[in-house]
């Protein structure tokens, strides 16, 4: 009788232990499965084995019409301003067709409420050129002498003609990852204005043809260079 009771107790304990082990394993498996699900890996949240349901976020540019939009804050100090209005019909910019200038030229911008093209875009910063009587280049520019031709003109410089090389419309698409970048503007009005100052950034250049150069003979000889003369 005693042997039978001991046998029954042992069997009960064994069965209970197996049941608890199965329950524990099942719970652990559920936790792991939820953590490494395929949809939780990566940014696109789709099945890793198929591209059928993977669709890129649609790029949606602003649709506000010119003269009805609000100026966008610059992304960082001196960042090229974003285009706050619809550009349908305005691009691509061609050699003889730049429709941006119809509103943004300084003599027109104030009347239509547009941002005027700054003076830097009307300034020629190219190296100084030397030509013989037949128009052939002579005496290549000596970069040590800062021989830069900085000349203000009344015409939009060709280097600045392609507006969309730097300025682009703002996309309204949803971000896969939140942008936490915080700009540190060095100018108090840096959110809306450039810090470019023609007197500050050109004072050490030979800005007037025939003017003085700030580069000395020692600079040209490169006497202080660790690489030698």
Image (spheres, rainbow, N blue to C red):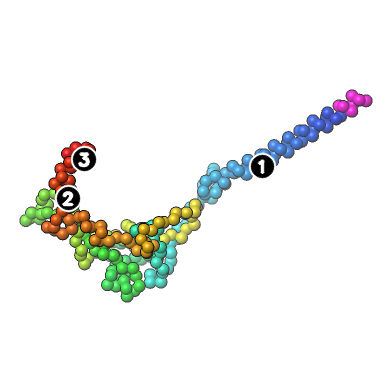
Q: Which of labels 2 and 1 is toward the front?
A: 2
Residue with the mark numbered 1 = 30
- How far apart marks 1 and 3 lie (CA) works out to 67 Å
Principal secondary structure, stretch drawn in magenta? helix
Is residue 111 shown above or below 228? below
The residue most toward the right is 1
- How far apart marks 2 and 1 lie (CA) works out to 73 Å
From the top left corner, tell me how far across and down residue 214 is, in percent: 17, 52
Q: Residues within 10 Å of mark 3 (few under 14, many from 20)?
A: few
From the top left corner, tell me how far across and down residue 9 is, in percent: 85, 30
In front of the other: 174 or 24: 24
- What residue lies at 31% left-to-right and 66% top-to-bottom? 100
The residue most toward the left is 133
Q: Earlier in the sequence, mark 1 or mark 3?
A: 1
From the top left corner, tell me how far across and down residue 43 is, in percent: 51, 48
Is residue 127 shown above or below 34? below
- How far apart marks 3 and 2 lie (CA) works out to 15 Å
Q: Which of labels 1 and 3 is toward the front?
A: 3
**Element on which disc 3 rests:** loop
Q: Report the magenta residues as a range.
A: 1-7
- What residue lies at 83% left-to-right and 28% top-to-bottom? 10
**Element on which disc 2 rests:** loop
Q: Residues within 10 Å of mark 1 (few under 14, many from 20)?
A: few
Is residue 5 on the magenta stretch?
yes
- 26 left or right, relative to 145: right
Residue 138 numbered tag = none
Q: Residues within 10 Å of mark 2 (few under 14, many from 20)?
A: some
Residue with the mark numbered 2 = 215
Residue with the mark numbered 3 = 225
């Amino acid at each position: 009788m005693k042997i039978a009771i001991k046998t029954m107790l042992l069997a009960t304990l064994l069965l209970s232990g197996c049941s608890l082990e199965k329950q524990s394993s099942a719970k652990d498996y559920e936790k792991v499965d939820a953590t490494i699900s395929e949809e939780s890996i990566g940014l696109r949240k789709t099945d890793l084995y198929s591209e059928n349901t993977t669709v890129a976020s649609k790029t949606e540019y602003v649709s506000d019409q010119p003269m009805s939009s609000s100026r966008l804050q610059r992304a960082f100090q001196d960042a090229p301003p974003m285009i706050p209005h619809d550009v349908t019909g305005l691009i691509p910019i061609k050699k003889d067709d730049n429709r941006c200038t119809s509103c943004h030229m300084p003599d027109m911008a104030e009347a239509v409420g547009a941002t005027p093209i700054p003076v830097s875009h009307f300034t020629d910063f190219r190296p100084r050129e030397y030509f013989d009587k037949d128009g052939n280049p002579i005496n290549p520019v000596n970069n040590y002498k800062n021989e830069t031709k900085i000349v203000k003109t009344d015409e939009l410089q060709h280097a600045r003609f392609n507006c969309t090389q730097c300025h682009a419309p703002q996309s309204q698409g949803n971000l896969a990852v939140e942008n936490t970048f915080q700009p540190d503007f060095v100018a108090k009005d840096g959110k809306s204005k450039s810090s470019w100052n023609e007197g500050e950034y050109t004072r050490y250049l030979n800005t007037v043809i025939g003017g003085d150069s700030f580069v000395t003979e020692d600079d040209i000889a490169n006497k202080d260079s660790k690489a030698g003369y």
